[in-house]
Image (cartoon, rainbow, N blue to C red):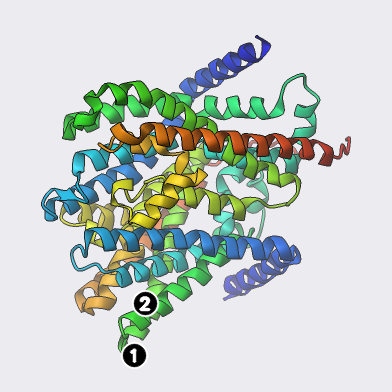
Amino acid sequence: MKEIKFALYAIKKNIQNSAELKTSFLMNVFGMAINNTAFIIIWVFFVKTVGVINGWTASDIIGLLGFQAICFGIVLSIGDGLRRLPDLVSSGSFDRFLLSPKNLLVRIATSSFGPSAVGDTIFGIICLIFYGILIHATLYQILLIIFLIIVTTIIFLSLVIIIYSTSFLFTDSDQVTTGIFNFFLTPSLFNGGAFHGLMKFIFTFIVPSLLVGAIPVEIVRDISIRKILLISALTVFWFFLSIKIFNKCVKKYESSNFMTFGN
Amino acid sequence: MKAIRLASKILKTLTKDRMHYPERLIVDTLSVLARFGVLITLYSYVFKINGGVINNTTFVVAAWSMFFYFSFMILGLRNISKVIMHDVRTGNVEVLFSKPISYIFYRFWWQIGLGLYSFVVITIVGGLTLYLAIGFPSTFASSIFLFTVPFVFLGGVILSLILYGIVGLLAFWIQDINPVFWIVDKAVMILGGSYLPVALFPLIMYKIALYSPFGASQFLTHSVYESWQGNWYELFSIQFFWIIILGFTLYFMFRGAKKKVSVNGG
């Protein structure tokens, strides 16, 4: 409870801090929202040219981008500090986090705020509203969408924690973590109809990119209890795995002691 | 002569550096695998269920067109925008301005040098793998293709550097160029034929790709199509036109930027 209180306080202060630079903040938010529409343009033209694949229509792709953007936006706006881990580790600034009496992971995640990710969140909300309208969502489907937003956000957070925990394992980890992150993120933006057979298995269970976009859309569309149970179980699995990996990786940290006292 | 010496020194040093630290090669390979690898699987399936031909284009041609796009992207020329913004924000630009070299050309060569090693390795290995998997399109055997590809590639490199250089120079006037960068970058991504090959573009989108600088910077992706045999000189002219227009824009912006620099000392 104390940790949540602290996290909320840190997030509030971070938002206030970012909002001080009003023009830059707004440009980042709206720039990112416009930037994301590129994927809608691409996939809508794709469906128009090649037709529906495995039942995936243009509205399903809007839903996919909605889920993906919303979890990306929530995690990387309030938990932007996780993305700074490679820099914190290589510069030795990580020492000050170790000395903090607060929960280490919460302290790192909330140490920075990503204003551009707010644009992703707004874009995601708009997409999901449109998606709901396009599929004539029932009350049950609307509740399912809200539930799946929570679930996909936890999965996305878990994957971000795992990926950026590798910062403790490499010397020049910035590029490695970026590469692994893109490897996970890119397939989550693709038309879900493209994944079948072995590809679907790999990107669901090994690199769980489909869990933050394609699978939630399939659940809303088909209302499959089996898939709801599967995604819930995988959420719990990835979350606990991420905490375990993070704690294990932190032990690899060696202070570079630049005598900068965290500056 | 001095300029050539500087360029070759930068390229040599950075290539050696990249060979010594192979992390970037791993990152670039992962990135290409994630994007191109998944895309190619998607399109092989899409072409299969559409009888092998979409918009008079076969899978082999579409695959090589997309491969050219992703291979070109490995050069990482677009990152010049962020590098210039970083220089401006940190004050590094003051130091570089005081050196007896052209800042813009220094940054151009630096950007090419950073991506050159990964570009060469991944293009050769990726190209060979793709050839073994699906073969070459028949257009590769034409003399027009062989003669024009190096030039359209070079034009793409120059135009990309100028385009993203202009975005970078905006940092002298606006504090955060990221929103502008995202929009330009996504325009290049859409119109360059990344996720949707140019042959599958609707007519209006194809026209925009043809006549905008964003699409012109990626004309390399057009070179694998049959239509290239007949319209290569038109596309060359468009690319050349944008290099001249945007080249002048960059030149005048850079002159203006120099006047905006305030040396804070320290």
Residue at (30% x, 65% y) in the render: A214
Side (left or right) of A6 relative to A82? right
Disc number at residue B229?
none
Q: Chain of mark 1?
A: A
- Which quadrant holds residue B256? top right
Residue at (56% x, 48% y) in the render: A85
Mark closest to the chain's N terminus, 2 or 1? 2
Q: Nearer the viewer, residue A124 or B206?
A: B206
Image location (x, y in percent) of residue B218: 43, 39
Mark 2 element type: helix
Q: Residue furthest bottom?
A: A139
Compared to residue A9, the image places residue B196 above or below, namely above
Image location (x, y in percent) of residue A155: 39, 64
Side (left or right) of B46 relative to A3? left
Residue under label 1 = A139
Compared to residue A64, the image places residue B13 above or below, namely above
Residue under label 2 = A131
Residue type indicated by callout 2: Tyr
How far apart marks 2 and 1 lie (CA) works out to 14 Å
Label total for image:
2
Residue at (71% x, 46% y) in the render: B171
Q: Quadrant of the N terminus of chain A?
A: bottom right
Q: Chain of mark 2?
A: A
Q: Nearer the viewer, residue A10 or A199?
A: A199
Asked if residue A248 shows in the view, the reply is: no
Residue type indicated by callout 1: Leu
Compared to residue B109, the image places residue A147 above or below, namely below
